[in-house]
Amino acid sequence: MPRPLHTLLLAAALSGSLALPVLAQPRAEVVARGLAHPWALAFLPDGRLLVTERAGRLRLIGADGRVLQTVAGLPPVDAGGQCGLLDLAVDPRFAENGRLYWTYAEASEGGNGVAVARGRLEGGRLEDVRVIFRQQPKVRSSLHCGSRLVFGRDGTLYVGLGDRFSRKDDAQDPSNHLGKVVRITTEGTVPADNPYVGQAGRAPEVWSLGHRNIQAAALHPATGEVWTAEHGPQGGDELNVVEAGRNYGWPLLTFGRNYGLGTRIGEEGPRPGFEQPLRTWAPTSVAPSGMAFVAGERYPGWQGSLLLGTLRGEALLRLTLDGRRVVAEERLLQGLKERIRDVRQGPDGWVYVVTDSADGKVLRLRP
């Protein structure tokens, strides 16, 4: 019996080449437009969509793509530069509790920091809003806020955080939340099995350290692992699986270079005690943002692929995986010439992407 096309393609990719044969590009149809620098997309069980806009608005969009309203009840957002209202996640038990979770830059004495808040969606308003996590220390910066939210299989919440453009080794210091992935409960408490619980001089919320600016994260549907992608400086973007207590190197280990100069920042590794990335993009950054694993039958041959949005690259990357190994990469949607900020697979099985501009769009991919 002849082998399916996608099997043949994977076998070819496994031979060592990262280039896939040219396949038919997916068609991007506009679901909604007129969004001001949208950042994240989430789906409600009834088919409606929620989109965050970096300036501080949460928009509710009907299943027909009509922007219904701006959701009220958000706390004040310190918007500017790369920071503002950022990621959004719907509680896995939303049908029971109506809860949403979001990350945003929160102003306070000493500057600002990334906060995680939750609230109950009632009609077009958030009720019972409270902050469940605050990044420490506060800094005076509008850069490298991150951030992404991922629910683990056990219901805990992983939060990817940027280093706030620190020029020190703050990302290597386990006593703070800069350049870290933190893991908390939905109440904001610390899970007892976090790696640094009870250790002096280490923040108990920290799950992993040595990150620069995480703007993509997703749960692997088969393994339950949390995968992330982060921005390097001049080159050096990384794809990682973040594991408890592991150090991902920044700024001691990086394939990136100093802006403009092209000089080394640290070592490239490998080095004992540090994790090597699964994939890097160097010497030219793609600026990854948003990711999703493909499941279901909507996209024949794409099952198990990892989709990764890019800002500088203005493309949607499709990575073919063999376990944790990236064996092929395909660039999609380049003809749009749009910064792709977020990527999600909806409950209807279709892949949706969000473009980052003053006239941002939600697009649905048709094969």
Image: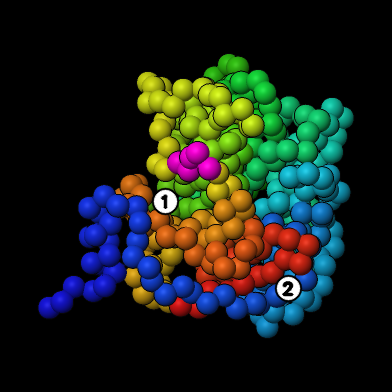
Nearer the camera: disc 2 or disc 1: 2
Quarter of the figure with the N terminus: bottom left
Q: Can residue 234 be seen in this view?
A: yes
Q: Where is residue 38 in the image (x, y as percent from the top left)?
A: 72, 60
Give the Cα distance between marks 2 and 1. 33 Å
State whether residue 245 is above or below residue 227.
Answer: above
Kind of element beneath mark 2: strand
For residue 33, which numbered disc appears in the image?
2
The amino acid pointed to by label 1 is Gly
For residue 265, which numbered disc appears in the image?
none
For residue 224, which numbered disc appears in the image?
1
Residue at 64 percent of width and 62 percent of height: 338
Q: Can residue 204 be seen in this view?
A: no
Q: What stretch is highlighted in magenta?
A: 280-284
Magenta stretch: includes residue 283: yes
Kind of element beneath mark 1: loop
Q: Nearer the viewer, residue 345 or 19?
A: 19
Q: Nearer the viewer, residue 227 or 310?
A: 310
Snapshot quadrant of residue 147: top right
